[in-house]
Amino acid sequence: MAIRQILVAPDARLKQKSAPVERVDDALRALMDDMLETMYEAPGIGLAAIQIGVAKRVIVMDLAREDAPAAPQYFVNPEILWASDETTLCEEGCLSVPDLYDEVERPTRVKVRYLDYYGEIREVDAEGMLAVCLQHEMDHLEGILFIDHLSKLKRSMMMKKLEKAKRLGAPA
């Protein structure tokens, strides 16, 4: 396993749409292992492959609390089958938009089909943090950052903070 560099906005690669994975094999599992190690090191709770420069439809997550054992989850080619009409506001952050947070409105519940770590087809009815995190990470697969859900003014302010931090070599 290896820790990979996480791309930070406004890196153009983050706006790229990710390609479907043809099969889950040892090479893809090695990528997922690297992604998980990178996410833990950052630290974060979710990471899409595009955030390390790999344009594949792959997500890793671990929503376990700090005092609980690790509970990694792997989602290959995830697709939302259903989303509730009911929405919720949740404060979101992103490893590719470091140290900046804001509220995003998303469906409260979603049903997602995906391939797991071994290539088995799975479905999950997600709500709460799992639903929010899945939607956030799946946005990455479409080239969408959480700040793209904000008003033009808020997004512009966040991008200016990121650009200033980049110039100064410090977190936003």
Image (spheres, rainbow, N blue to C red):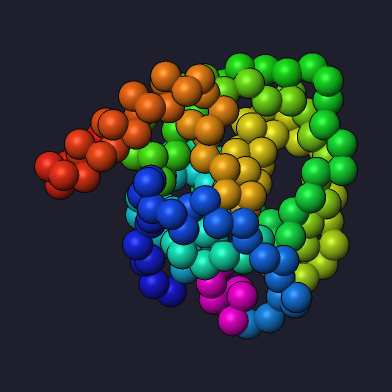
Q: Position of residue 166 (x, y in %)?
A: 21, 45
Q: Nearer the viewer, residue 29 or 142?
A: 142
Q: Is residue 103 left or right of residue 105?
A: left
Asked if residue 145 is positioned above or below residue 51 in the image, the reply reads: above
Q: Is residue 101 left or right of residue 70?
A: left
Residue located at (57% from left, 65% from top): 55
Q: Going by the picture, which residue comes out furthest to the left?
A: 168
* Quadrant in the rendering for residue 131: top right
Q: Nearer the viewer, residue 171 or 74?
A: 171
Residue located at (75% from left, 77% from top): 23
Q: Going by the picture, which residue comes out furthest to the bottom?
A: 26
Residue located at (85% from left, 62% from top): 121
- The C terminus sits in image quarter: top left
> Number of labelled discs?
0
Asked if residue 31 is positioned above or below residue 38 in the image, the reply reads: below
Q: Position of residue 98 (x, y in %)?
A: 34, 39
User: What kind of secondary structure does the magenta stretch mostly adopt?
Assistant: helix
- The N terminus sits in image quarter: bottom left
Magenta region: which residues?
A: 27-32
Asked if residue 96 is positioned above or below residue 161 in the image, the reply reads: below
* Quadrant in the rendering for residue 158: top left
Q: Is residue 42 magenta?
A: no
Asked if residue 111 shows in the view, the reply is yes
Asked if residue 64 shows in the view, the reply is no
Q: Position of residue 84 (x, y in %)?
A: 83, 25
Q: Position of residue 148 (x, y in %)?
A: 53, 33
Q: Nearer the viewer, residue 166 or 58?
A: 166
Residue located at (62% from left, 66% from top): 56
